[in-house]
Amino acid sequence: MSTFDLTQRMAPFLDMHLIIPLLEFIEPRGIYDEKSLTEMHRQLLSKTNMIDSVIETYNGKPIPEAVEAKKKQIIKERDELKNKVDSVVAILEIPEVKEMMDNNRERDGNVRILEHLTQNHNFTVDMVDTLFKYSKFMYECGNYTVASVCLYYYRNLVNQADPNYLNALYGKLASEILLQEWEHARDDLLKLRAYIDANPFDTEWELVTQRAWLMHWALFVYYNYPKGRDEIIEMFLNQQPYLNAIQVLAPHLLRYLAVAVVTSKSRQKNSLKDLVKVIDIERHSYKDPVTDFLTCLYIKYDFDEAQEMLQKCEEVLSNDFFLTAVLGDFRESARLLIFEMFCRIHQCITIEMLARRLNMSQEEAERWIVDLIRTYRIEGAKIDSKLGQVVMGVKSVSIHEQVMENTKRLTLRAQQIALQLEKGRQDKVKAN
């Protein structure tokens, strides 16, 4: 199953601390060689200040002297930074100052807070730099609680033009993700998105890259947040700039978008058609059992192959860090899509045939179908009890709707080509 593991494709868009949970997830699943995975895990940890975690990877084996020396250096540097930052934090935790930060909603609020601190508490600009350095150091040590608090303070003291402002937004978001504080993480994600969408970057390519990064980080939040899958659909599919970023830089995100659409009870009907079009366009650059399942069902109309892909989907989702928890929802929703599409293609099907396929009595099958139609409100579905058939109504598509759909598809393709040309231009610039 390593063929369908996306860890290596996603790693370039993630901070090292966010890659570590992915490695820890796949380690016991036997997808990769255990020895090479342990070594990769150790190398990744070695790039951080999480030195105790590095030592644990040796499992009782002799620890290199360089590792022990690094531990001593980290402890020394931590103590030095803490001595400098204690006085800074003491000022920022004064109730009056904390209240100003908590109520900071205005655009120039950060400037006013800093002015107040400078005039009334002997606060200096150097203290702001010290706060950021300490935040980053504690984050690298894996102390995400301290990092989160200090970055919150930092974010309330500097304006958006500060060179470290974007790093502070990412650091705060990562800290909340790793602490599994999903409410705070969602708030930080929205702040980061607002900053990126304001486009403070020098080139269009940098903007597209930042959007790709943002979507990867959003997976941690939205697959752990109530109705988060609906927010994935809104960002990944309904916002054209983000969809463009997926098509140009990260087509593997189509797996997570597809699962979100299939399992969404409120947005599936309105989003499925657009999703299938994107999957069809991107088949040359990315496909996996999840996208192939929808291709078989809505493009090839091959129900036997769709059933085979659904079986593979179960294995893919069970080995995916973000999707393993939604496997049951995906299985149920996918089976419903197969049933609905099968009935639509054939327009009517005998309950007796369905009963045989479902290994039920005819009476049980009829009750199951009635419950299915009521629960999921399958459009146009009716049961003819006298004839023992399920009948699906056919909805005609007007010429106006066809023109609108084709125009939308051409626009999407044109934007994708423009971004690919920009990518080629950037690659040439880098080469020269």
Image: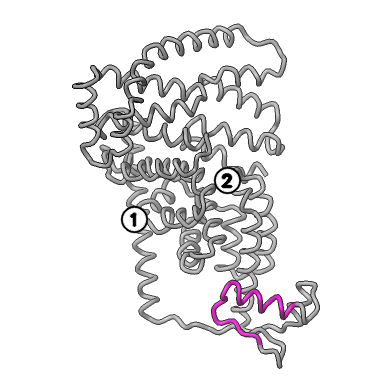
**How many discs appear?**
2
Is residue 217 placed above or below 413 in the rendered structure? above
Residue 188: in magenta span: no
From the top left corner, tell me how far across and down residue 405 is, in percent.
39, 71
Using residue 62 as the reference point, say whether residue 17 is left or right of it.
Answer: left
**Quadrant of the rendered image containing residue 115:** top left
Q: Amino acid at mark 2?
A: Phe
Q: Quadrant of the C terminus?
A: top left
Is residue 95 placed above or below 231 in the rendered structure? above
186 vs 206, nearest the viewer: 186
From the top left corner, tell me how far across and down residue 221 is, in percent.
49, 45
Q: Amino acid at mark 1?
A: Gln
**Range covered by the magenta-colored residues:** 365-383
60 vs 399, nearest the viewer: 60
432 vs 237, nearest the viewer: 237
Using residue 143 as the reference point, say whether residue 121 is left or right of it.
Answer: left
Q: Quadrant of the N terminus?
A: top right
Disc 2: CA contacts within 10 A as few (<14), some (14-19) or many (>=20)? some
Residue at image mark 2: 322
Mark identifier at residue 405? none
Image point (64%, 74%), residue name: 372
Pick out the residue farthest to the front. 95
Image point (46%, 41%), residue name: 217
Mark identifier at residue 415? 1
**Quadrant of the rendered image containing residue 389:** bottom right
From the top left corner, tell me how far across and down residue 420 is, in percent.
37, 48
Marks 2 and 1, how far apart at CA: 29 Å
